[in-house]
Amino acid sequence: MPDVPESRILIVDADPDFLSWAATHLKAPGVTVVTVERSEEAVAVYQKQRADLVLAEVRMPGMSGIELLKRLRMNDPNAMVILFSGIASTSNVIEAMRLGAYDVLSKEKLPYELRTIVESALFSNESRRATRAQVSEVPAETIQETIIGRSAPMQEVFKMIGRVSRSDAPVMITGESGCGKELVAGAIHKFSPRTQKTFVAINITSIPDNLMESEIFGHEKGSFTGAVAQRIGRFEQCDGGTLFLDEIGDMPLAVQSKLLRVLQEGEFCRVGSNQTLKCDVRVLAATNKDLEAEVAKGTFREDLFYRLNVVRIHIPPLRERREDVRLLAEFFLNRQSARRRGPMMRFTDDALSLLEAYDWPGNVRELENTIQRACALSNSDVLLPSDIPLGSTASSRHNNSASTVTRMRDALTTLIHVAQTTPDMELIPWIEKELTRLAYRHFEENAPKTAKFLGLKVTEVQARLDPGAIKKPVVKKALA
């Protein structure tokens, strides 16, 4: 670690072996490392002599790392804290970043990341102390746990949610359809100082263009055909709260102009009224479009784009974070089991492998719908690969061993049944050929791998696959 001017690091963990390793790992000229095993001790040590950086485990007996972070920053708004954990929940990561943690690290990655992160924290300490304000206390609520993910991309999303929830800056949430943009918007609101106020979500594509302005800003009685009474718009409805505009890229240009005025001036008029109304609303927007391209085409206002795109959070598609599929699938399955009020359902390993290998073009929404459909159609509390109705798209990987083996088993069962019920010895070579063909396709036409899988020689595999080697038998009338 490079020299830093008289830096003091306080490390908190219940494991003395880890404390010894961390102290040695961070040893450097001008750096003093103090270690304690309980958060309560850390508070006392910090009160006597403040540290430039505190490293703490999230899960500890007594006061947790989150509670320690909160206690330290209540007494010292500039306290710099890094939390680490073996398994940090979604809520813990978001709550830690909301409370002002410098970072939340995975404990298994500390040997590779700790020194770099600590160096960055120490060298930016003075500037952060000068610019960071105390975080106001809001009730710690657990967000809806459908924002699930242990993958590195989702951990970054959680950290961004924690950071942006502290301010009123507009946020642009991007990502493919079904990846959970509204859930992220809801989490930003829940962890913000506006949490006690209204959160309103609007899907722009679900509102006809001629009613868009009225829906968002309201209208006066008689302002247009069908306006039989005054209507309060969404901005008035969530005054003091948060308005989420989903699929903002589909908003008509005329409405974009009025939205820009609200963002700039904090005021608007209802349709058919000259009265100017004031409002205090935080606007979050989402899109699955390339808004830069829409600006270039002239279908989206450039000035509005920059007003909305102050902070951007991108949600990666599910195919780019396959390690989260199992967590999500089991969460959705447990929720469906609770609703059925029957025995808890579970997946076989083959079923989970099938889910993890699929590309999920519809992302989390498609996964949830698939699990719901599987539970509705299943007659058992154990879901097999054949119970899971995946989409007909070609995005499922061809090298999915679980699904291929299942198809081979089904084919074998059918063909054996035919052979048993039909006295025709010529069917046996046909069965062998069909199974060999399935295995050959599964192993991407790799004859040696196919031979190893079937326990055959490569020449035997080639013979079975040769169109002239074995002729398909003549099917007797008994099979018709």
Image: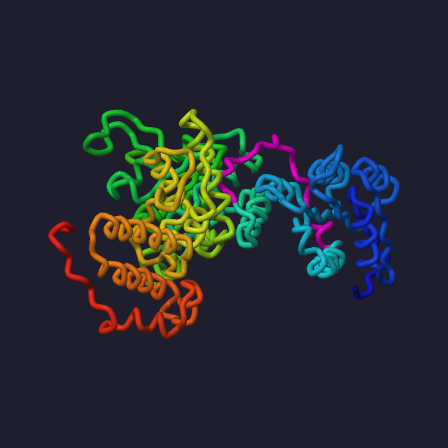
Give me the residue at 20% from left, 56% from top. 424
Q: Position of residue 392 (x, y in %)?
A: 29, 52
Q: Which residues are magenta?
A: 126-148
x%, y% of residue 185? Answer: 47, 42
The colour scheme is rainbow
Of 60 and 178, the residue lying toward us: 60
Q: Is residue 144 magenta?
A: yes
Could you say where residue 423 lies in the image, as x and y percent from the top left?
A: 20, 53
Image quadrant where residue 429 sits: bottom left
| Residue 457 in view, yes or no | yes
Q: Does 463 appear above or below 61?
A: below
Residue 198: % across, % down: 47, 31
Residue 253 visible within the image: no
Q: Furthest-left residue in view? A: 477
Chief SS of the magenta region: loop
Relative placement, left or right, of 249 versus 70 is left
**Closer to the camera in the image, 345 or 46:** 345
Q: Quadrant of residue 57?
A: top right
Q: Quadrant of the N terminus?
A: bottom right
Q: Establish if 70 lies above or below 303.
A: above
Q: How many marks?
A: 0
Q: Give whichever of 6, 426 is nearer the camera.
A: 426
* 347 horizontally vs 15: left or right: left
From what the image shows, is residue 259 above or below residue 195? below
Q: Nearer the viewer, residue 22 or 404?
A: 404
At a point 23% along the width and 72% down the height, the residue shown is 467
* 220 in the magenta segment: no
Q: In this rendering, is residue 220 above or below 95?
A: above
